[in-house]
Amino acid sequence: MENKYRVIDETKWKRALHCQIFRNSIEPAYCVTFELDITNFLEKIKAAKLSFTFSLIFITTKCANDIEEFRYRFLDGQIVLYDKINTAFTYLDKNTELFKVVNVELQDTLESYVSAATQKAAAQKEYFTGPLGNDIFQFSPMPWVSYTHISHTNSGKKDNATPLFDWGKYFDRDVRKILPFSVQVHHSFVDGVHIGKLVDSLQNHLDKF
């Protein structure tokens, strides 16, 4: 199903100047790493026998969709705002130790998304099925390392405004389970205040899961 969007009239858009300044930067994307307390979330996920990875992708996507700035993209030179952003994630083939990129449409419920993602990841044989769409959030978890910082490859395409979410290996701190989490965004659309909103929303959802 085709995803809907609206073209932004930059002459009336409050962020037009900020967008243009960062769009002309040599490196317009930036990455922020922070910690999330997943103690309650992890307990509930294990009890429900749901995939940790797919569950966290769903929650993150829902939280980011609620923040308008995460749904802006460049499209054919114009600025557009999508109604909804879907998901694309890396999935490791344990036999080859190579990953494939799997696209899954966002579902209404966590259970339906986990089911759809599980089926799609298992069924897809190709490592890459083509260029990623503009209306996705990218996820590339790295659960083997508990990192304090992460950087990403740069395609050189300055108008690539797709947010990229990662997390590392969770660890114990006192009696809590702590997860290093990072997000890379395009500064034309997303400022630190919006990252802060995402962090607060994510932690709230994880606490009340």
Image: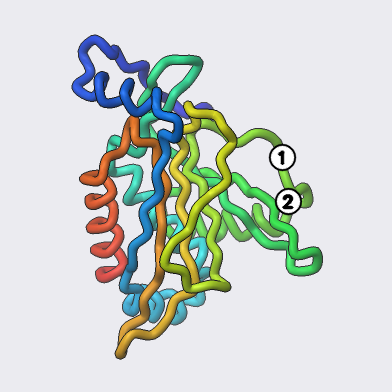
Q: Nearer the viewer, residue 193 or 50?
A: 193
In the image, 188 versus 87, the foreground residue is: 188
- Left or right relative to 201: residue 163: right
Q: Disc 1 versus disc 2: distance between alpha carbons?
A: 9 Å
Circle 1/circle 2 CB separation < 8 Å: yes
For residue 82, above or below residue 116:
above
Q: Residue at x 46, y 79 (%)?
A: 46
Amino acid under label 1?
Answer: Thr
Q: Residue at x 36, y 53 (%)?
A: 32
Specify the amino acid type for callout 2: Gln
Image quadrant holding the N terminus, namely top right
Badge 2 crowding class, 10 Å Cα cut-off, few under 14, some 14 to 19, many 20 or more, is: some
The residue to which callout 1 is attached is: 129
Whether residue 202 is situated above or below residue 15 in the rendered picture: below
Q: Residue at x 24, y 63 (%)?
A: 204
Colouring mode (rainbow / by chain / secondary structure / one colour): rainbow
Q: Is residue 81 above or below residue 139?
A: above
